[in-house]
Image: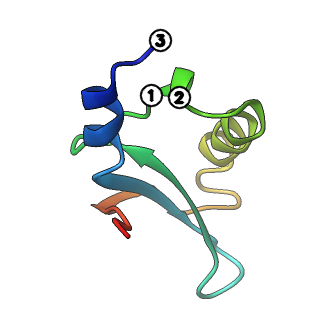
Amino acid sequence: MPSLSTCAVAQAYQIRFQSLFHTGRAVSFPCDGQGRVLLEALSERARQNYERACAGIGSEYTMPTVVPGDLH
């Protein structure tokens, strides 16, 4: 189980996959500053979406970028 401090750090950033076909559309997931996603912290559905996004790089999505997280 991930520690609270690990989860807090992971949510400080997001890895974002922009759609190649739909301007302004993207999927994003919590990550650390290096773009590493804590898969154990994701729900099953989010994990599947993340894996789909990774597999779709170049055909559906751009290379992902790491951006500051939405800390609200």
- For the residues labelled 2 and 1, the Cα–Cα distance comes to 6 Å
Asked which secondary structure carries label 1, the reply is: loop
- For the residues labelled 2 and 3, the Cα–Cα distance comes to 8 Å
Q: Residue furthest bottom?
A: 23
Picture coordinates of residue 47, whole percent (x, y)? 67, 34
At label 1, counting other C-alpha atoms closer than 10 Å, the crowd grade (few under 14, some 14-19, many 20 or more) is some
Q: Mark 1 points at which residue?
A: 38
Q: Mark 2 points at which residue?
A: 41
Picture coordinates of residue 7, whole percent (x, y)? 36, 34
Please name the amino acid that badge 1 sits on.
Leu
Task: Give the mark toward the camera: 2 or 1.
Answer: 2
Q: Name the residue under label 3.
A: 1
Determine whether 68 is above or below 39 in the image: below
Asked which secondary structure carries label 3, the reply is: loop
Residue at 44% from the left image edge and 28% from the top image edge? 38
Q: Quadrant of the C terminus?
A: bottom left
Query: Of 56 and 5, which appears nearest the observer?
Result: 5
Please name the amino acid that badge 2 sits on.
Ala
